[in-house]
Image: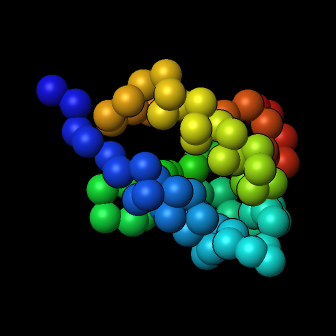
Amino acid sequence: PHSVVSLFDQQIAELKICNGIAAPITDCPGTEAVTTGVSRTAMWTLTAPQGATINVFKGSWEQCCNAARATCPGTFTATCIGGVTSGE
């Protein structure tokens, strides 16, 4: 059985990565290698490849999250291409 993740919780958790990327902040600036955003039923954990940091714009991050949710409702793991200082 799949867990039910609220779309609202998903969207709030998306904005809590990198100590918060809600407006007016538009990106994770490449200072962290791992970050987590949590809101009730949703949790996103981003992990950059070894030696890299997370450097992703909010719009690209939201697109990746929405595509993953559309493809895999419930609990899932996704890989977002780009958004790090080196590697994929």
Q: Quadrant of residue 19?
A: bottom right
Q: Quadrant of the C terminus?
A: top right
Depth check: 29 or 69 in front?
Answer: 69
| Residue at 80% over, 54% down | 57
Query: Residue 14 appears at what percent x and percent y?
Result: 56, 57
Percent of width and height locating residue 82:
79, 36
Total tally of numbered discs in the picture: 0
Identify the coloring. Answer: rainbow
Q: Tell whether 24 sits left or right of 18.
A: right
Work out whether 43 lies above or below 66.
Answer: below
Check the picture and name the quadrant holding the N terminus. Answer: top left
Q: Evaluate whether residue 52 shows in this view.
A: no
Residue 53 quadrant: bottom right
* Residue drawn where x is 49% and y is 61% of the image: 13
Residue at the (52%, 57%) spot, across then down: 11
- Along the line of sight, the residue nearer the viewer: 54 or 15: 15
Is residue 78 found left or right of 3 in the rendered image? right
Foreground residue, 84 or 57?
57
Q: Residue at x 66, y 47 (%)?
A: 62
Would residue 72 be visible to someone looking at this image? yes
Please tell me whether residue 22 is drawn above or below residue 70 in the rendered image: below
Point out residue 72 in the picture as x, y percentages from the top left corner. 42, 25
Of all residues, the one furthest to the top in this rendering is: 71
16 or 87: which is nearer to us?
16
